[in-house]
Image: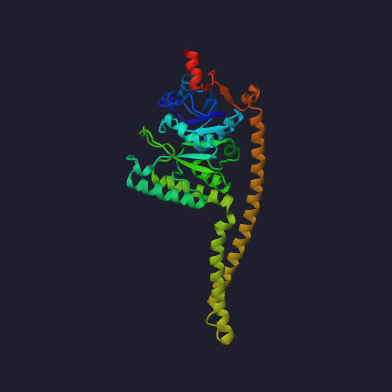
Amino acid sequence: MKLVIQIPCWNEGNCLGETLLALPRQIVGIDVIEVLVIDDGSSDDTVAIARTNGAHHVVRLPQHRGLAEAFATGLDAALQLGADIIVNTDADHQYPGAEIPNLVRPIVEGRADLVIGNRQTDKLKEFSAAKRWLQRWGSRLIRSLSGTDVADSPSGFRALNRKCALGLFVHNRFTYTLESVIAAGQQGLAIVNVPIQTNPSRRPSRLFRSVPEYLRRAGPVLFRSYAMYRPTRLVGVLVLVLFCFGAITAGRFLYHYLKNPSYSGYTQSLVLGMGALVIAVVLAGAALLAELIASNRRLLEDIRTRVRRLEGAAAAKPEQLKRAGIEPTGEKPWQFEPPEAAKGSGA
């Protein structure tokens, strides 16, 4: 079984070396470990540090494209490298490398398709009370939208098996964490939470500068992600409310008209009710059209999944990797050596 640890980087030369050196060289149940660094348009020595501190492969993006696109690029590259399990971690060493064996264990044991490291944010001293509250309610919203029990949905420390990675696509450039949880939940994948410890933060987040900015950018991502998978359910409640309101209001006019046709004092109820009914019908039609588009998108994603599977089957050919922009560093893969074999070799 092959594990690829992918690390998206953007000007992480100051801490990438420490992160790489802390990665585990052997994990029980894993035969081969390789490290993939995705350079998201860095202007410092990130690539040089990756090459000299144990990374096996580097993928360079010509310019900074954001964390979500770097993550998606890493998934494609890891699949082409023949990964059975992919671990995503941050370059700033927020997530200890020693936690990776715990993260991949549910996948090795066949209990999970996606494992998310739960930072236990209620216990983190670095989080303010407001941020803890936001984290708690945000994760609760994600659980409701995705139909999962994910405890820490914004956590970027996660492991995916090949099945999950093949069918996972990110459609925004801000963050992959929220959208991928919703997608995994709608696809019926098995998701497991693993409590982890984190290292102290070494710098402010580069993804957003403040909580209001995060809410402003994450809100549309959540709305769009849920709309892609459940467009009818998204507008169904609104359609039902408008239809009932319109029927009751127009019925009020009809009741009084039949009771006294010569009295026209309830004309405003007719106008308001018919307006609500028309809007409800238009929204229902739009929801039906969106459902058809979503079905077509699922077919296209199925085609892309099959293409990914075919590309992964040809991963052993160096020319295929070169065309995909995957640069080898010359570092030998880390291979698991059973304790018995290690003792025998030492004797």
Res. 61 in view: no
Q: Name the foreground residue: 338 vs 153.
A: 338
**Image quadrant where residue 84 sits:** top right
- Does 64 sit left or right of 232 as displayed? left
Can the viewer see residue 283? yes
Q: Position of residue 105 (x, y in %)?
A: 49, 34
Q: In which quadrant is the N terminus drawn? A: top right
Q: How many numbered badges does the structure rendering display?
A: 0
Q: Tell me if residue 14 comes above or below residue 284 in the rendering.
A: above
Q: Residue furthest top?
A: 347
**Residue 263: percent from left, percent from top:** 55, 86
In the image shown, does 169 or 117 lie closer to the viewer? 117
Give the percent coordinates (x, y) of residue 247. Answer: 57, 73
Q: Quadrant of residue 282?
A: bottom right
**Residue drawn 57% across the image and 68% down it:** 243
Q: Is residue 215 above or below residue 78?
A: below
Q: Is residue 114 above or below residue 219?
A: above
Q: Nearer the viewer, residue 91 or 69?
A: 91
Residue 223 vertical placement versus 52 (above, below): below
Question: What residue do we see at 67% from left, 38% from top?
Answer: 306
Q: How is the image coloured?
A: rainbow
